């Protein structure tokens, strides 16, 4: 009788341990699967790999896609943040000559 009771007690204990273990495993699985799901739609900052160009007039750094360009006589390309800066640069370069 006492042996049977002990076996039953061990069996119940094993059930409780197994349940706690599975709850822990489920928690780990949920915890591990959550970050990629929340991370999925978010992407890194755009134009991270794009090399920035400098406006020679006002010194602003901007991505080449957003910049106004001016090709000089020597073939060098200048980038400007605005039409105002481009005109100013053209005036300065023409005043030098
Ligand atoms: Zn500028």
Image: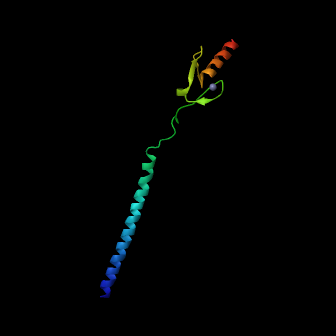
Q: Quadrant of residue 86?
A: top right
Image coordinates for residue 36, horizontal then vertical, percent: 43, 49
Residue 96 against residue 1 in the figure, above or below? above
Q: Quadrant of residue 76?
A: top right
Residue 31 against residue 54 in the figure, above or below? below
Image coordinates for residue 79, horizontal then vertical, percent: 59, 23
Q: Quadrant of residue 19?
A: bottom left
Residue at x 39% of width, y 61% of height: 26
Image coordinates for residue 21, horizontal then vertical, percent: 39, 67
Image coordinates for residue 14, horizontal then vertical, percent: 35, 74
Q: Is residue 25 left or right of residue 47?
A: left
For this orientation, the residue located farthest to the right is 96
For this orientation, the residue located farthest to the bottom is 1
Residue 73 against residue 34 in the figure, above or below? above
Q: Is residue 1 left or right of residue 94?
A: left
Quadrant hosting ligand 1: top right
Residue at x 37% of width, y 76% of height: 13
Q: Nearer the viewer, residue 90 or 2?
A: 90
Q: Could you tell me which quadrant the N terminus lies in? A: bottom left
Residue 61 against residue 24 in the figure, above or below? above
Q: Could you tell me which quadrant the C terminus lies in? A: top right
Residue at x 39% of width, y 65% of height: 23
Q: Is residue 16 left or right of residue 42?
A: left
């Amino acid at each position: 009788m006492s042996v049977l009771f002990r076996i039953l007690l061990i069996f119940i204990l094993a059930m409780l341990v197994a349940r706690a273990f599975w709850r822990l495993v489920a928690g780990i699985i949920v915890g591990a699967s959550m970050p990629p799901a929340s991370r999925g739609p978010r992407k890194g900052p755009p134009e991270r790999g794009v090399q920035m160009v400098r406006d020679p007039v006002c010194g602003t750094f901007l991505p080449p896609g957003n910049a106004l360009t001016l090709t000089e006589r020597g073939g060098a390309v200048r980038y400007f943040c605005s039409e105002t800066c481009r005109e100013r640069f053209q005036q300065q370069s023409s005043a030098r000559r």
